[in-house]
Image: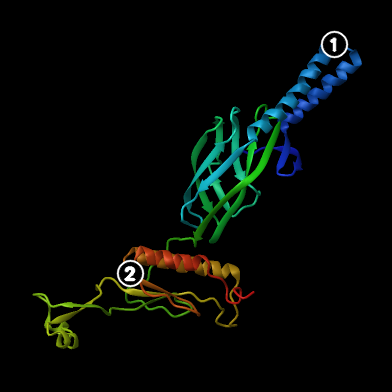
Amino acid sequence: MTSTRSLFTIALHNRTLQLTREGLGFIIILIGVGLGAINTGNNLLYLILAMCCSFIVVSGILSEMSLKKLSVQGEAPAFLYAREHGVLKLKLSNHKKWEPSYSIRIKPAQSRQPFTLEPEPYFFFIPSGSTIDKQVMLTAQKRGHLKIATCRLATRFPFGFFYKTKTIPFNLEAVVFPAIHPIKLPDQSETGIEGEGSVQPRGEELHAVREFQPGDSLSSVHWKSSAKTGNLRVKEFQSHNLQSYTVFLTLTNPTTNQPIQEDVLEERVSEAASLIYHLIQRGHEVSLKTEETQSTFGSSEKHLMDLMYSLAFIERLGEKNE
């Protein structure tokens, strides 16, 4: 991303004006020419001084015209995972009738934000009455609700003496799921301990009852259902290679029975999300259990999204009522 070395900043309403290193050098030359013109009375130096002053005035006017009547719209994914890239579609519109805009950068409203844009959005030329599209990578650092209310338009046009910015509405919202990282999945025979082991398999169990088909074993006949319907019906079990797992997420310290620290919570949430993600990707059924609730079992994409949404907004015990 391009960095600008500013020597001082003037802020007024929704605009800021920063003097760049190049601008400082130009002002020093301007002062030197002015002193020379006063000491010598040379008309040529006065003309050069007037021309240099006009450059500063023109710079301010053109930069303001370039930032005038611009709007930004963003289209983020419905969800994204923390610390992973998601495509953000930006639309920069120039609502001026005649004047184009030049050299516009889109920057966060504050220097420290829970997200990054790579590469920094840059628009070299925006014709009057037109809209320019650009795609950048949006990376959120924390799970939860990502809301970007404003952004800054910045330009060094035309001479680079000043770096002018303007804050405008942006209104972008997205849901950030917990970070997913590689994790060792439990063996099918492995049983976890609630609160520490994180995972417990549910084992094979009755999946459905269906009509008897040639080749079915008589040992799998569901006699009660067959007696009611008058037709042979057999029990269908889950595949031997696929199991159902319960992922435990404890929000309290077992020794003190107090809510866990925030950094410990984020680590546990990320671990639970990683287990759920990889288990469902393998086709296993997964349920999420906390001290307060337990979800149903499922292995569909929708079930995965529901669990990730729950983990995105889960809080420490006691915080919901504060």
Picture residue at 28% right of the left edge, 71% below the top: 242
Nearest to the eye among marks 2 and 1: give it: 1
Question: In the visual, does 148 lie left or right of 291?
Answer: right
Q: CA distance from mark 2 to mark 1?
A: 87 Å
What residue appears at the point 15 percent right and 81 percent down from the top-left corner? Answer: 233
Disc 1 element: helix
Q: Report the amino acid beneath label 2.
A: His
Q: Position of residue 164 (x, y in %)?
A: 69, 36
Residue 65 position, x and y percent, is: 66, 31
Q: Residue beneath label 2, please?
A: 284
At horizontal 33% and vertical 69% (from top left) the residue drawn is: 284
**Coordinates of residue 91 in the picture (x, y in percent):** 52, 41
Q: How many marks?
A: 2
In this picture the colour scheme is: rainbow
Q: Earlier in the sequence, mark 2 or mark 1?
A: 1
- Viewer can see residue 63: yes
In the image, taking residue 147 as reference, residue 193 lies left or right, namely left
Residue furthest top in the image: 43
Residue 125 is labelled as none
Residue on which disc 1 sits: 43
Q: Quadrant of the C terminus?
A: bottom right
The answer to which image quadrant residue 193 occupies is bottom left
> In terms of depth relative to the viewer, which is nearer, 113 or 56?
56
For numbered disc 2, what is the local secondary structure? loop
Q: Quadrant of residue 105?
A: top right
Q: Residues within 10 Å of mark 1 (few under 14, many from 20)?
A: few
Looking at the rendering, in which quadrant would you find the N terminus?
Answer: top right
Q: Residue furthest left?
A: 214
Look at 51% across and 76% down and name the residue there.
250
Single out the residue that lies furthest toward the right: 39
